[in-house]
Image (cartoon, helix red, strand yellow):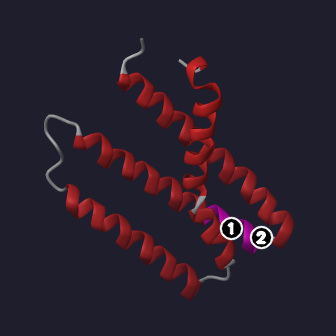
C-alpha cells in the first residue's frame, strides 16, 4: 500500500500539470477564436487560477502540520484580495477580453474535475 502523503503529492503534481496544459491549450484556442486579446485574457485568468491553486495547496498542507503557519488567516484573505485586485485592473486598464479571463479563472477547477475522472477510471493503476 502506498502512503497517503505520496498519493497526495502525486495527485497535486497531476493537477498542476493538467492546469498548465489546459492554460496552454486554452490560450491557443482563444487566440484562434478571438485573437491576441482573448489569448492574453485566458492566459492571465489561467495564471491567476494556477497561483490560487498553489496557495490553496499551501493552506491545506499547513493544516495537518505539527506547526501550522501563524499567519494562515491573513494569507487566505490576501489571496482573495489579490484576485479581486487583479480582476479590477484587468477590467479597468486593459483591453484583454474579460470573458476569456473569467473562463481562464476556472481552469484549476477543470483540472480537479479531470483528476477526479482519472482517479475514477484508472485510480488503482496510477500507484
Residue behind mark 2: 36
On residue 110, which mark appears? none
Please state the horizontal and vertical placement of residue 113, each as a whole percent of the image: 59, 47
- Residue at 55 percent across and 46 percent down: it is 112
Residue contact between numbered discs 1 and 2, judged by CB atoms under 8 Å: yes
112 lies above or below 119: below
- Residue at 28 percent across and 67 percent down: it is 77
Please state the horizontal and vertical placement of residue 23, each as a whole percent of the image: 66, 53
Camera-side residue of 63 and 26 = 63
- Is 38 displayed left or right of 10 in the figure? right
- Number of labels in the image equals 2
- Residue at the far bottom in the pictured view: 92
Q: Is residue 33 magenta?
A: no
- Is 57 displayed left or right of 30 in the figure? left
Please state the horizontal and vertical placement of residue 65, each as a whole percent of the image: 20, 36
Q: Which residues are magenta?
A: 36-44
105 lies above or below 20: below
State the quadrant of the N terminus: top left
Please state the horizontal and vertical placement of residue 10, each as a whole percent of the image: 49, 28
Within 10 Å of disc 1 (Cα), the crowding (few <14, some 14-19, many 20+) is: many
Name the secondary structure under disc 1: helix
74 lies above or below 1: below
- Residue at 61 percent across and 52 percent down: it is 110
- Residue at 73 percent across and 59 percent down: it is 27
Residue behind mark 1: 40
Within 10 Å of disc 2 (Cα), the crowding (few <14, some 14-19, many 20+) is: some
- Residue at the far front in the pictured view: 120
- Residue at the far top in the pictured view: 1
**Label 1 – label 2 distance at C-alpha:** 6 Å
Amino acid at each position: 500500500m502506498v502512503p497517503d502523503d505520496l498519493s497526495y503529492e502525486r495527485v497535486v503534481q497531476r493537477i498542476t500539470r493538467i492546469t498548465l496544459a489546459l492554460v496552454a491549450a486554452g490560450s491557443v484556442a482563444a487566440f484562434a477564436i478571438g485573437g491576441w486579446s482573448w489569448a492574453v485574457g485566458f492566459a492571465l485568468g489561467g495564471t491567476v487560477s494556477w497561483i490560487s491553486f498553489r496557495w490553496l495547496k499551501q493552506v491545506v498542507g499547513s493544516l495537518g502540520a505539527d506547526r501550522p503557519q501563524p499567519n494562515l488567516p491573513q494569507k487566505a484573505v490576501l489571496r482573495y484580495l489579490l484576485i479581486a485586485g487583479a480582476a479590477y485592473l484587468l477590467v479597468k486598464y486593459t483591453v484583454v477580453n474579460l470573458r476569456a479571463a473569467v473562463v481562464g479563472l476556472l481552469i484549476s477547477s477543470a483540472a480537479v474535475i479531470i483528476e477526479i475522472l482519472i482517479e475514477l477510471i484508472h485510480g488503482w493503476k496510477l500507484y
